[in-house]
Image (cartoon, grey):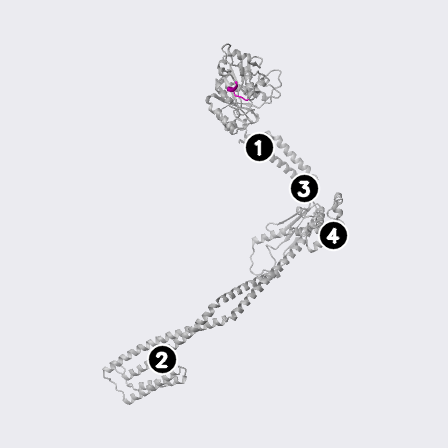
């Protein structure tokens, strides 16, 4: 949609916009002239939510989201019915007890049945009791309901107070500000200060109650966890699980030690057996060779005796279970004597060679020692294996007992963990409850305002006018946007897409006749610019028809009320001014307005081609002239629900229109609307051209598109379209 068109639309309706703005401003001025003065008092409260003065317990970090939530909770608590009603009780008690109440009731309020029914002393007792105990009045009790209505009479009910109260957080600070606006400055200051007091009372009450309930709950949980832990410990002690575990641990330690000793002893046994094998091989060599060293028989006998005594002492020691220390000492003494004797039998001078072969006696002594050591190791190994076997049996027994008690041990551990957690929670809550204090502080006491708040009356009046101005503009633009009528030639070209040969401006024909406007008679009323434009538009249309070369023209439209009758009449007068002879035939059987308007005789149905009389003569006899110069002739028709083919004779006038062109310069026919009737389609075969008439105030719908399509199918026979009833203010918008 063109911007210029929108601007012209607004300009066209400028007086509506101006009137709406002035009306809104005047109405606002009138409604605000009796506004009473308002006085505002305020106070600021430090919360401690972001900057706390208390001693920190633990390692708590500051949480911005938590602080914001606390601010919201505090504001909601301040504006809750519990706190606001406590303030209401305080205000009503002041008005009932003081000589100068804040609210002066009007005489009609004092004469009301409610005011007379209320016992003032009883009301004071009820309000004082509720204020002291911090209980609210309820509306389902008749007596208390009257008290609530009594508060409303004074304007101290919850809704009335909330309209005057504003509570908000001062941005980027730790403060909450409370504002109270009323018609009495003393009331504003009193209300805001008492609101803080009632909030602190209520806050302390709910905080102490909640803290005590929380501590009691946590303490009960801790005691219950302790009882469960003691019970499970008693079950474990009764089953001997603790001693079994200790015994199992000690047994496994002994088994590990014995296994290490067994491995060492087995290694020693392997070494001793290897040494014995070497000695036996050496003795075998001595038996095959002569010994270079002869030991005296006496010495040899002594060695044998000592060796036998040593072996006997060892056997006695082993027989005692290796526990007799005296036998073991005797064995060591005899062993040293035997070794000393063997050493005494060796030559005093060392051999000249690097390594002299050992004597047979020495080899026999060495063999004897190795045999004794081997037997000792075997005994020790057997003893260690026996002890390990015994200990493993004991360990398996303890393991069986431990497996059955594993569930109890885990239960005890879980119960102990739960008890410690419950104890820690209770301790933290107790310390927090003991150390936390009320952090709210009233930094600024509310004072009665000296001057009233700005009335903002001029601002309200101005805003009302601007709002009405903007609203009226938007409404007009919205209606213009919704208006899809063919207002201008440009819009017509986009919506209809048919050849436009001319437009006719809108004319008010209630005071002027078409003949007076077109012919411009001297005795006609004063002509205006619209009259001249209308006359010029008809002249342009006359030129287009003359240029087309078509003399028999049908005027059709998609719907009724498009102005075909007006255009045909005005165009005929315009042609008569140029000395042209015109024949008008009304073929609109469904609505013969042309016949009625021009005063013609319905004779079309009677005209039939007759060789006995010329057709032109018949037409002139039936036609009616409407101008002084006798150049415009009109043939009327009857009105009825029928088509030309149904009502006209077989050889009717329409089939011989070209014969009439000898007597008439132009023949104009008016057809019914295409959307409703098919007459125009039948009539199109008798004419040279068809002109479509469209009203600028009409809109194109789907049924119109079908009729427009018919116009397009006519091809060259379609002379063009005429846009009728165009508003001159919209001509240059598209």
Of 391 and 330, the residue lying toward us: 391
Above or below residue 649? Residue 195 is below
Image quadrant of residue 436? Answer: bottom right
Which circle's residue, 3 or 4, is located before the other in the chain?
Answer: 4
* Mark 4, residue position: 124
Percent across and percent down for residue 145 are 70, 49
Q: Which mark is residue 376?
A: 2
For label 2, the crowd category at 10 Å Cα-Cα, with few meaning under 14, some 14 to 19 and many 20 or more, is some
Residue 21 is left or right of residue 300, and the answer is right
Which circle's residue, 4 or 1, is located before the other in the chain?
Answer: 4
Which circle's residue, 2 or 1, is located before the other in the chain?
Answer: 2
* Mark 3, residue position: 455
Which circle's residue, 1 or 3, is located before the other in the chain?
Answer: 3
* Mark 1, residue position: 479
Residue 354 at least partly seen: no
Report the magenta residues as a range: 641-647
Q: Residue at x 56, y 62 (%)?
A: 422
For label 3, the crowd category at 10 Å Cα-Cα, with few meaning under 14, some 14 to 19 and many 20 or more, is few
Q: Residue furthest bottom?
A: 298
Percent across and percent down for residue 143 are 72, 50
Percent across and percent down for residue 465 are 63, 36
Q: Nearer the viewer, mark 2 or mark 1?
A: 2
For label 1, the crowd category at 10 Å Cα-Cα, with few meaning under 14, some 14 to 19 and many 20 or more, is few
Distance (Cα) linking label 3 and label 4: 36 Å
Above or below residue 577? Residue 225 is below
Q: Are marks 4 and 1 in contact (CB under 8 Å)?
A: no
């Amino acid at each position: 949609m063109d911007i210029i068109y929108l601007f012209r639309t607004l300009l066209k309706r400028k007086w509506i916009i101006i009137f709406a703005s002035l009306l809104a401003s005047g109405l606002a001025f009138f409604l605000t002239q009796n506004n009473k003065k308002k006085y505002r008092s305020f106070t600021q409260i430090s919360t401690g939510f972001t900057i706390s003065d208390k001693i920190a317990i633990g390692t708590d970090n500051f949480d911005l989201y938590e602080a914001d939530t606390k601010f919201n909770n505090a504001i909601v608590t301040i504006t809750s019915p519990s706190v606001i009603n406590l303030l209401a009780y305080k205000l009503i008690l002041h008005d009932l007890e003081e000589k100068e109440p804040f609210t002066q009731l009007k005489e009609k309020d004092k004469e009301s049945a409610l005011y007379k029914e209320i016992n003032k002393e009883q009301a004071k007792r009820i309000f004082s009791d509720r204020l002291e105990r911090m209980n609210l009045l309820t509306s389902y009790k008749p007596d208390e309901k009257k008290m609530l209505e009594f508060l409303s009479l004074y304007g101290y009910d919850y809704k009335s107070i909330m309209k005057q109260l504003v509570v908000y957080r001062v941005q980027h600070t730790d403060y909450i500000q409370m504002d109270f606006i009323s018609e009495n400055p003393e009331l504003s200051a009193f209300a805001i200060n008492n609101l803080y007091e009632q909030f602190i009372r209520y806050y302390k009450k709910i905080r102490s109650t909640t803290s005590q309930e929380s501590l009691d709950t946590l303490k009960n949980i801790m005691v219950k966890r302790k009882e469960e832990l003691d019970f499970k410990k008693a079950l474990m002690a009764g089953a001997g699980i603790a001693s079994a575990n200790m015994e199992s641990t000690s047994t496994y330690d002994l088994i590990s030690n014995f296994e290490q000793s067994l491995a060492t002893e087995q290694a020693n046994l392997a070494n001793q057996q290897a040494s014995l094998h070497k000695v036996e091989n050496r003795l075998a060599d001595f038996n095959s060779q002569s010994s270079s060293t002869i030991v005296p028989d006496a010495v040899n006998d002594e060695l044998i005796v000592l060796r036998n005594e040593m072996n006997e002492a060892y056997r006695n020691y082993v027989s005692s279970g290796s526990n007799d220390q005296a036998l073991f000492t005797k064995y060591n003494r005899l062993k040293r004597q035997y070794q000393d004797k063997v050493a005494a039998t060796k030559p005093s001078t060392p051999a000249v060679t690097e390594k002299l072969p050992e004597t047979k006696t020495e080899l026999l002594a060495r063999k004897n020692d190795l045999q004794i050591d081997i037997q000792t190791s075997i005994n020790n190994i057997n003893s260690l294996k026996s002890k390990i076997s015994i200990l493993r049996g004991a360990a398996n027994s303890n393991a069986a007992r431990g497996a059955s008690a594993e569930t109890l041990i885990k239960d005890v551990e879980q119960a102990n963990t739960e008890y410690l957690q419950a104890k820690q929670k209770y301790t933290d809550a107790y310390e927090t409850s003991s150390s936390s204090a009320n952090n709210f502080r009233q930094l600024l006491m509310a004072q009665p305002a000296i001057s009233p708040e700005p009335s903002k009356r001029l601002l309200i009046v101005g805003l009302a006018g601007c709002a009405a101005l903007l609203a009226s503009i938007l409404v007009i633009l919205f209606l213009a946007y919704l208006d899809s009528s063919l207002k201008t030639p440009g819009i017509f070209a986009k919506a209809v897409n048919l050849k436009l040969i001319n437009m006719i401006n809108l004319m008010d024909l209630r005071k002027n006749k078409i003949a007076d406007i077109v012919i411009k008679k001297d005795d006609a009323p004063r002509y205006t610019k619209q009259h001249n434009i209308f006359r010029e538009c008809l002249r342009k249309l006359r030129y287009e028809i003359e240029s087309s070369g078509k003399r028999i023209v049908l005027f059709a439209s998609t719907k009724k009320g498009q102005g075909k009758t007006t255009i045909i009449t005005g165009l005929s007068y315009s042609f008569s001014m140029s000395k042209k002879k015109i024949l008008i035939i009304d073929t609109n059987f469904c609505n013969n307005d042309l016949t009625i308007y021009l005063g013609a005789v319905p004779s079309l149905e009677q005209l039939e081609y007759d060789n006995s009389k010329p057709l032109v003569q018949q037409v002139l006899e039936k036609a009616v002239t409407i101008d002084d110069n006798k150049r415009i002739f009109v043939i009327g028709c009857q009105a009825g629900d029928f088509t030309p083919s149904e009502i006209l004779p077989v050889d009717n006038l329409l089939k011989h229109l070209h014969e009439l062109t000898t007597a008439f310069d132009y023949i104009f026919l008016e057809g019914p609307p295409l959307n409703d009737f098919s007459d125009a389609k039948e009539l199109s075969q008798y004419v040279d051209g068809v002109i479509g008439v469209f009203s600028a105030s009409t809109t194109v719908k789907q049924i119109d598109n079908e009729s427009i399509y018919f116009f397009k199918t006519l091809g060259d026979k379609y002379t063009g379209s005429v846009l009728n009833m165009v508003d001159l203010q919209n001509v240059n918008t598209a």
